[in-house]
Amino acid sequence: MVTPARALAGCAAWLAACLGLGAAGCLDPDYHCTASHDCDVGEAGRCEVDHRCTAYDLTCDSHRRYSDHSGPASGTCFDDAVTPANLCAAGQPPARSEGCAATVCKALTSCCDTGWSEACVQQAQLSCSDVVCDTRIAITATDKMGDTELVDLTWDGAHWMMRSDARKGVLAWLAPAPGQAQPRLAGFAATGSALVYDGGSVALTADRSYLEATSVDFDRDGRPTAVLGYTDMNGNPRLEVVKLDDGSTRSISTLAARLSWGDLDHDAFPDGMATSTSPGSGTYRLLTNAEATDSTRSRTIGAAVDSSMAAGITPGSPAVRGFDWIDANRDHRLDAIAYGSGINVHLGQNLGLSDTPQIRVDCNPPALVATCNGSGTTTDTQTQQSFAGAAVPEATGAAVVIAEFPASPMVAPTLHRVEVTGSTLDLAQAAMYTLPPCTTGTCPPIVAVVARDLDGDHQLDIIAIDSELNVYTALGSQLQLSRAIKLPVTLPMAVFEVRTSVTGAPR
Amino acid sequence: MIRSDGRAPRWLAAALVIAGLAAAIPVRADPVDDHVARGRQLYDQGEFRQARDELLAAYQLEPRPELLFALGQVELNLGRFAQAIDYYQRFIATSPAADQIALAQQAIGAARARLAERPAALPPPFPKPAAPPRPPPQPRWDDADTGLVALGGAIMVLGGGLVYYGHHRAGDHSGTLSQYDDRLSSATLDVWGGAGCLVAGAAVLGSGLVRWRLHLVDAELQPLAAPRAAGVTWVQRW
């Protein structure tokens, strides 16, 4: 007789065997690291933000491949692309090509290949009907003595709001934390010994003079990364790569002022531009993100590729005001524009940006350098003109808004909108913006220009700031600048330059 | 004179006896007489078994001495010589007339001669009773089965332990990746070894169960009798 007990025993035995085999088959190794030193298999092991190890592998775009025992990702190329929770904020890792980002990346490949830069935000505002952002501008106004006025300026879609900030050095917007939507306003503690941002802080070395705070996925590791510009105690410029999640830092020796990030060489790693900390130097550097040749394979800045403004420095203005990124020649790659004593446009090429700009602009009215210095239609010399500006992508083209900074205060400031035609600026067809009448006889010059969609109509609007910190706006294709708000100025001396750090959040 | 087969004298004697019976018994509608009459008729027809039955039936109703002689004659014709002698002797014991005694003794002599001539025909053997149906062979649990199942179970427990231990080690993410890799390698061995043990254990355990199930045993109880003992012995056939 087959008793129930014996039948049960037999079934249990086979069940146990099946479960055992199943258990053996289900052994799914999934190692979770906590720090890069945990990843000691392969070359230059690194612990990624998902707590899995990668090792150096040149065959991957990111130069990283997941190690064994990384769960389902084992053996695949590491990719830090994300689905941004906030398409209105720059400085994030590259976006996955889906939804609005897919549209953006069709126009600008670097947005999905390299990083989500301000050019990507502008393209999203133009191309995506569901992207409507508020506008937040962190303003750092500096006088000639280096004193700063820090103002947090926000347009919420209906009103301008401003708030003075007590931090030191510079005020800048950092990208949202991974998975979050809110960008983080950052500045340096009064003692200079910490980067203080919304929701956290990172201790810094106190004997440094910090100049810049930017967000960029410099290492393509998807971790929240800030790159700071500073000069050390000997006055040498440096970049400091700060991991906001663990506070780790590393320094890179290179130019460090007016940091701006885009893509120079289309190698999937973000590149930047920066200038000297000396206001009188017209030299700026193309910061090529390169790989250290040592065993760490860490990212650094490659050999110096410098460029410079065409000619002499305009009195009363910095030689280099800043940089901008736009696909000027519609080849779906970012081109770089440098503003200052002249305007230099570096058009992207297959092999990356050339250190020699393809377009040089100077003089009053703005003209190609070749026609400046009294020749042709220009009436001024290069040294008598400086520029601020902003790149303005358009639905079917691109434009550059150029603000003149005449050396003579008696010359009324002007703002031009210049279309990019072919591979040059159509300066002859520039449109002129009109400013409100000046109340004090001589109008202060425009020293900063920002292009963002303020009213949600998917056209980029112009925000201009003069040297007295009056803020003007012009919506869409309008050429009439209206005064929007006056920012407080407590500096003991006249404002020398205004730097802006722009971000936003969906509204 | 007695013939070798003794048939004519027996027939004559029987005829005499039965005639005598018929003469001695008053004519009446008697069941005994009816049996006797049918017995005589059957005897005449050579149907000796039926004739015996009729005579026995009559004797049951009324044990007349002469019926004993008649039964002896019938048994003699049936070849049951010893039974015939017995009937004759029982007839003589009823103290019949001297001539009837002499006749009975003559019949006894003839029966004994036939008995001596060849062994008395044995009564037809009773049909051997059909053997009770043998019970179907039954599986029986024995020590070997117990051993196999216990061994299989132990191996399975060992295998399960190894699988659990391997999984436990694989789930330990402490240390560096290379340490984890080493640990995982040995954990993989543990797990697969454990899985092998589970399979092997299940096979052993299953073989015990299969052996028990297929290893059929004929089993029956037979009484054991002895002058001073009694019991039951288990007899099995493989």
Image (tube, rainbow, N blue to C red):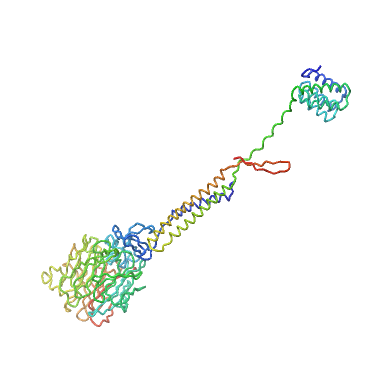
User: In the figure, is residue B154 to the left or right of A181?
Assistant: right
User: Which of the 4 image quadrants contains residue A450?
Assistant: bottom left
Q: Residue furthest left?
A: A375
Judge whether residue B61 can be spotted in this image.
Answer: yes
Q: Is residue B204 above or below residue A239?
A: above
Q: Residue furthest top?
A: B1
Check the picture and name the quadrant holding the C terminus of chain A. Answer: bottom left
In front: A276, or A430? A276
Q: Nearer the viewer, residue A260 or B199?
A: B199
- In the image, what residue occupies the spot 26% across and 81% down? A491
Q: Is residue B199 above or below residue B33?
A: below
| Residue found at the very far front of the displayed protein | B228
Judging depth in this view, the residue of B52 and A197 nearest the camera is B52
Residue B229 pos. (x, y %): 72, 43
Q: Would you place residue B171 above or below residue B213 in this image? A: below
Residue A399 appears in view: no
Percent position of residue A226, x then y: 31, 70
Query: Image quadrant of residue B124?
Result: top right
Counting every numbered tag in the picture gives 0
**Residue A150 in the figure: left or right of residue B6:** left
Question: Residue B95's image quarter?
Answer: top right
Image coordinates of residue A445 in percent, x first then y, are: 21, 76
Residue A229 position, x and y percent, is 27, 72
